[in-house]
Image (tube, rainbow, N blue to C red):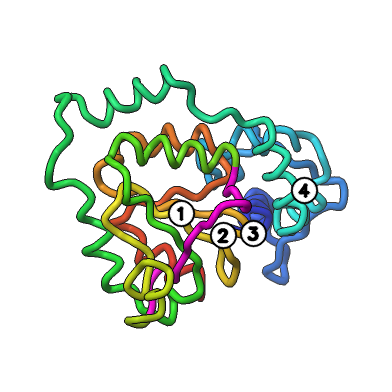
Amino acid sequence: MTNWGSIILNAYKKSQPILLNGTTKIAGNSKFSLQNPYILEVLPDELLKSVSIFEGKKLVRVCEALDNPNIINRYVKFCNKFNKGFSENELINLYKKAFPNIKIPTDANLDAMIHLASLNSKIGNQFDAHGLAKANIPEQLKQLNELLTKGIDKTRPFHTAPLTGQQGVGAGLGCAGSAYTDGSFIIVSGKGKTLIDDGIENVIVNDVYYSIINELKSKFPHINFVKANESVDYFSNLVK
């Protein structure tokens, strides 16, 4: 999980004068505000609406809350409770954007297989994953929408495996040591967590749906959506 509180605090410091000793002092009554250009610059568009509820609150308290995984997890669960996901019409519009030529390309969903093959297994083993690969490409978007809206159904079998792992680790889970990478999406836990117990924190988007990644981020702002061709750097940075 990204420590947005620390990122915001460091951004705010840049807007303050540097003292003679080379440090920056943050006044106790400093307020969080999206009017601060330094804060606005570091926040992605998909987070602006979410953090706007903290406008005018004490900066340090807001940053502490945003860095606290317990608070964030409760907030995410609260938001998910009321998140209806994409409607049928919205899904149709997403399909039109992803496939403007109507026909789904046959050479799609190759990036995850190519790039994740180079992700060190010591890193991949720290993330629990499940690839959405068994349905057709349009159905995989519906599956993702359902999972991010309602969560994983714990009453039904749900097989997971390391994002990348040693050969044979996932043999009993229906995969060859790691999650399937030939589908449109791979849902991934946070570092050292499990999908069943802790929920979805990251989604790897394969190349067929790159064009709708901004819509995904906007609809589900608390999920980290990662293009498959950027996934190795992303997960490597999470374990530094």
**Residues at discs 1 and 4 in contact (Cβ within 8 Å):** no
Pointer 1 with pointer 2, Cβ within 8 A: yes
Whether residue 180 is in magenta: the answer is no
Residue pictured at 48% horizontal, 27% vertical? 86
Amino acid type at image mark 3: Asp
Mark 3 or 4, nearer chain start = 4
Residue furthest to the top in view is: 89
Residue 136, percent from left and from top: 27, 40
Q: Tell me, yes or no, whether the two marked residues, 2 and 3, touch with CB atoms within 8 Å.
A: yes
Quadrant in which the N terminus appears = bottom right
Q: Which residues are magenta?
A: 151-165
Sequence-wise first label, 1 or 2? 1
Task: Classify mark 2: helix, strand or loop.
Answer: helix
Image height check: is 165 above or below 183? Answer: below
Nearer to the camera, 61 or 225: 225
Judging depth in this view, the residue of 45 and 195 nearest the camera is 195
Please state if 104 lies on the left or on the right of 232 as rendered.
left
Mark 1 → mark 3, Cα distance in angstroms:
12 Å
Q: Residue at x 32, y 51 (%)?
A: 133
Give the foreground label among 2 and 4.
2
Under mark 1, the amino acid is Ile
Please name the residue that numbered disc 4 is placed on: 62
- Viewed as shown, does residue 213 lie left or right of 137? right
Give the residue at x 69% y 36%. 81
Give coordinates of residue 159: x percent, y percent.
47, 62
Q: Residue under circle 3?
A: 198
Reply above or below: 191 against 34.
below
